[in-house]
């Protein structure tokens, strides 16, 4: 009974880790897309040069 519970617990942990990693990959892709859009669509400042679109 205990080995069965350990196997089920291990499967649950691995499934949770896999889901979390997949969610992190999707978040990384979304952040990359937003960064690329901001890089392409950045506005020009008063000198006509392209300015930074981020604040830091």
Image (cartoon, rainbow, N blue to C red):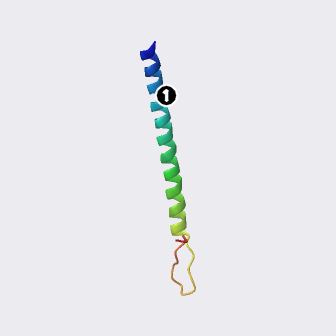
Above or below, 51 against 29 in this view is below
Instruction: In the rendered view, tell whether residue 52 sits above or below residue 1.
Output: below
> Which residue is pictured at 44% across the width and 21% down the height?
6
Residue 33 place in picture, x, y as percent: 52, 58
Farthest front residue in view: 2
Extreme residue in the top direction: 1
1 is higher (above) or lower (below) than 8:
above
Q: Where does label 1 land, which residue? A: 12
User: Which of these two is toward me, 7 or 49?
Assistant: 7
How many numbered marks are there?
1
Q: Where is 53 relative to 10, above or below?
A: below
Quarter occupied by residue 41: bottom right
Residue 4, quarter of picture: top left
**x, y percent for residue 43:** 57, 76
Seen at 54% across and 87% down, the residue is: 47
Q: Residues within 10 Å of mark 1 (few under 14, many from 20)?
A: few
Q: Residue 19's x, y, as percent?
A: 50, 37
Residue at image coords 52%, 74%? 52
Where residue 23 sits in the image (x, y, percent)?
52, 43
Q: Secondary structure at mark 1?
A: helix
């Amino acid at each position: 009974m205990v080995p069965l519970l350990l196997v089920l617990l291990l499967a649950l942990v691995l499934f949770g880790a896999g889901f979390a990693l997949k969610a992190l990959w999707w978040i990384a892709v979304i952040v990359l897309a937003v960064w690329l859009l901001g890089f392409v669509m950045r506005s020009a400042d008063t000198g006509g040069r392209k300015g930074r679109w981020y604040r830091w």
